Amino acid sequence: MFDVGKLMEMSNPALDDGVTMGARLRARRKALRQTLAQVALAAGVSEGFLSQLERDRNTASIATLQRVCESLQMSVGELFASQPATSIYRHGESHHHEVGSHVRKVRITPTSNHQLEGYIGEFDAYGSTGDEAYSHGDSEEMLLVISGRVEVTVGDRVDLLSALDSVSYLSSARHKVREIAGEPAFVLWVMSPPSY
């Protein structure tokens, strides 16, 4: 059986950017606000084993790492990828995804981020994230209006926001956004920890 831990012991236990595999696992678990017991149960390992893995005092097979990573909503590859010290977002080079009705959304943070996730939303006149409110994860989420005017519904509360206004809420609360002035609007969504 191939053992990633043994492979890492043959070289330097720290990865290219100086962060160990265990430290990445622990950081991801904490970012998701999961306990050792919750992740261990989901991955089918003992809490003690997971604790030792996070402290780089134990090794794991690829199959075990896959289960642990799956429970942490990450890929095994993310454990070994060097994390850039700086990430540049260039709006003109980004791939925008259509969401809702006449809204485009683009990620502005790397998918490897474990603490923070951000998106820019471009709303056409009267564009909306959809008729139905939605929820995702259990992150703290903030929406900041960059330009234009939008109506933000969170649960039963409805607020009208203009440029540089913001609203914060839990992403687990049902929410939706729509442009209300008949003109384009830009918003910024920021979530911690990532929930998409």
Image (spheres, rainbow, N blue to C red):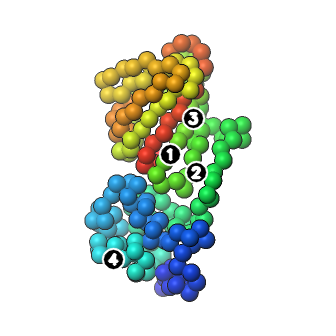
Is 170 on the left or on the right of 119, as rendered? left
Is 40 drawn above or below residue 88 in the view shown? below
Write down the residue under mark 1: 117
First in residue order: circle 4 vs circle 2? 4
Q: Estimate the spatial distance between the alpha carbons at disc 4 and disc 2, rounded to whole Å.
A: 30 Å
Write down the residue under mark 2: 110
Q: Secondary structure at mark 3?
A: strand
Write down the residue under mark 3: 120
Is 141 drawn above or below residue 20 in the view shown? above
Is 183 on the left or on the right of 132, as rendered? right
Is 26 drawn above or below residue 186 in the view shown? below
Q: Residues within 10 Å of mark 2 (few under 14, many from 20)?
A: some
What is the quadrant of residue 120 in the picture? top right
Q: Estimate the spatial distance between the alpha carbons at disc 4 and disc 1, rounded to whole Å.
A: 30 Å
Query: What is the x, y in percent for residue 57?
Result: 40, 80
> Which amino acid type is shown beneath numbered disc 4?
Phe
Q: Secondary structure at mark 1?
A: strand
Q: Residues within 10 Å of mark 4 (few under 14, many from 20)?
A: some
Q: Estimate the spatial distance between the alpha carbons at disc 1 and disc 3, rounded to whole Å.
A: 11 Å
Q: Estimate the spatial distance between the alpha carbons at disc 3 and disc 4, rounded to whole Å.
A: 40 Å
Q: Residue at x 56, y 19 (%)?
A: 148
Q: Which mark is residue 53?
A: none
Q: Residues within 10 Å of mark 1 (few under 14, many from 20)?
A: many
Q: Estimate the spatial distance between the alpha carbons at disc 2 and disc 1, rounded to whole Å.
A: 8 Å
Q: Is residue 126 visible?
A: yes
Q: Residue at x 55, y 52 (%)?
A: 111
Q: Residue at x 69, y 41 (%)?
A: 90
Given contact means CB atoms under 8 Å apart, are the residues at marks 2 and 3 in contact? no
Write down the residue under mark 4: 49
